[in-house]
Image: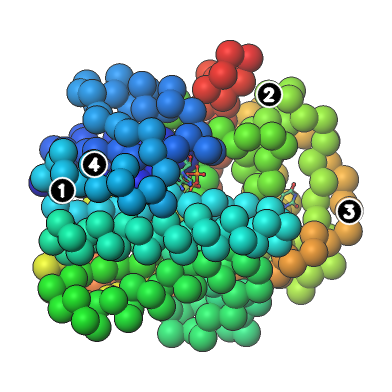
Amino acid sequence: MSVLVTGGAGFIGSHCCVDLATHGVDVVVVDDHSNSSPRALDRVAELVGVEIPSYEIDVRDPAELESVFAAHDIDAVIHFAARKAVGESVAMPIEYYESNVGGLLNLLRTMRAHEVDRLVFSSSCSIYGDADDVPILEDTPPRPTNPYARTKWMGEQILADACAVETAWSVMALRYFNPVGAHESGRIGEDPRGIPNNLMPYLTQLAVGRLHELSVFGDDYPTVDGTGVRDYIHVMDVVEGHRVALEHMTSPGFRSLNLGTGTGTSVLQLLAAFTEVCGRELPYRIVARRPGDVAELVADPERAAVELGWRARRDVLDMCRDAWRFQQENPGGYEPA
Ligand code: NAD
Ligand code: WQD
C-alpha cells in the first residue's frame, strides 16, 4: 500500500510517517516546509531505515501536486498540510481559508483525476467551540469560534458533500483533541517556530531554559482547580489511530471521529506531571484568561473505539516523558541549540 502524507514533515505528519513505514506502508510526503524543517524527514528516514520520497511543494499548486500523483501509484491520502495557529487565523483569515480550504480542494480534484478514493482528513476538536456538554460526542453541533476552526469545519462539510457524489470515496475526518508528546526515540518531536502558543511545547522549552516563566491563562474557570482542562493525547496514539482508520476504510462514505483519551487534565495538573518528569520546579504566574479559550474540552472517545477498535494507550506522564526527552536531546529542536 502506498500513502501520500501531506504535511508529512510537520509534528503529527512526521510521527505518522514513522508509524506507517514501520508497518510496511510505502510513504510519499509533500510539504512546503512553511512550518517544518526538512531535517524532520531525515530523522524519519533514520528511524525507519528507508528513504521517504518527499516533495517540497505547496498542496495548493495544481501542476506540482499533479506531478506527484503521476509519479507514484497512490492508494490513499492522509491530509495534514494546513496552517494551525488560532490567533494567526484571526489576523490572517484569507491566508487560512486559502491554505486550509484551497489546499483541500486542490487535493480532492487531483485525487479524483487519479481515482484515489481513500482520504483521512485532519480535523480538530476546535470545531466544537465552547461545547455545552463534556465529554464531547461527535454529534455535538459544531460551533467553531475562529477562522482556523471554521476552515476545519468547512473541510468536513466539503468532504461530506463530495462523498455524496463520489460514491466510491471513503473519507474519515479525525477530530484530534490536544496532540502532544513525541516518538519514544527522542529523535522526532514538536518543534514550533517562535514562542510556542501551546502549553506542552511551552513547558519543554521552559524546562530546557529557552523561556523563563509560564503564564497560566486564568484560574477562575469552573474546573477542578480553576485552570483550563484539555484532553491531551500522545502523538503516537494519534498516528496509530490514522493507520487503523486506513485499515477500516473498506466501505464508501464520510465519517467523523474524535481522537481523544476521554481524560481531562488541567493546566496545573499538566504542569505538576511535567515537573515530576523533568525533576525541577518550573516558575509560573497566573495571568488573565487568553481570549477565545474555553474552560473544558474533553472527548468522548467511544465511537472510535467501537468503529475502529482503537483507543489511546498512553497517559499524561508518558506524554510528558517523551516530549521532554525530545526537547532535552534537541534543545534547539531541529536547529542547532
Ligand atoms: P504542523 O504545522 O507541525 O504540520 C503541518 C505541516 O504542513 C507542516 O510541515 C507545514 O510545513 C505543512 N504545510 C502547511 N501548509 C502547507 C501547504 N499549503 N502545502 C504543503 N505543506 C503545507 O502541524 P501539526 O500539529 O502536525 O498538525 C497537522 C494537522 O493536524 C493540521 O491540519 C492541523 O490543523 C491538525 N490538528 C492539529 C492539532 C494540534 O494541536 N497539533 C490539533 C487538531 C488538528
Ligand atoms: C491548553 C491549555 C490554555 C499556553 C489548541 C488549538 C486547537 C487544537 C489544539 C488544532 C489552555 C493553557 C496554554 C500557555 C496556558 N489545535 N495555556 N499557558 O488552546 O486547547 O488548543 O491546540 O486544531 O485548535 O486552539 O491548546 O496548548 O494552547 O492550551 O495557560 O502558555 O493551556 O489556556 O487552557 P488549546 P493550548
Specify the amino acid type for callout 2. Val
Of tags 4 and 3, the one toward the viewer is 4
Q: Earlier in the sequence, mark 2 or mark 3?
A: 2
Q: Does mark 1's beta carbon lie closer than 8 Å to ligand 1?
A: no
The residue drawn where x is 49% and y is 67% is 152
Q: Where residue 250 sits: x, y (%)?
A: 11, 68
The one nearer the camera, 135 or 280, is 135
Q: How is the image coloured?
A: rainbow
Q: Mark 2 to mark 4: distance in Å?
A: 39 Å
Q: Are marks 2 and 4 in contact (CB under 8 Å)?
A: no
Find disc 2 in the rendering and name its residue.
208
Q: Position of residue 1 (x, y in %)?
A: 10, 46
With respect to residue 329, does 59 lie above or below? Answer: below
The residue at the point 63 percent across, 34 percent down is 193
Q: Which residue is mark 1?
A: 74
- What's under tag 1, amino acid-wise? Ile
Q: Is residue 22 visible?
A: yes
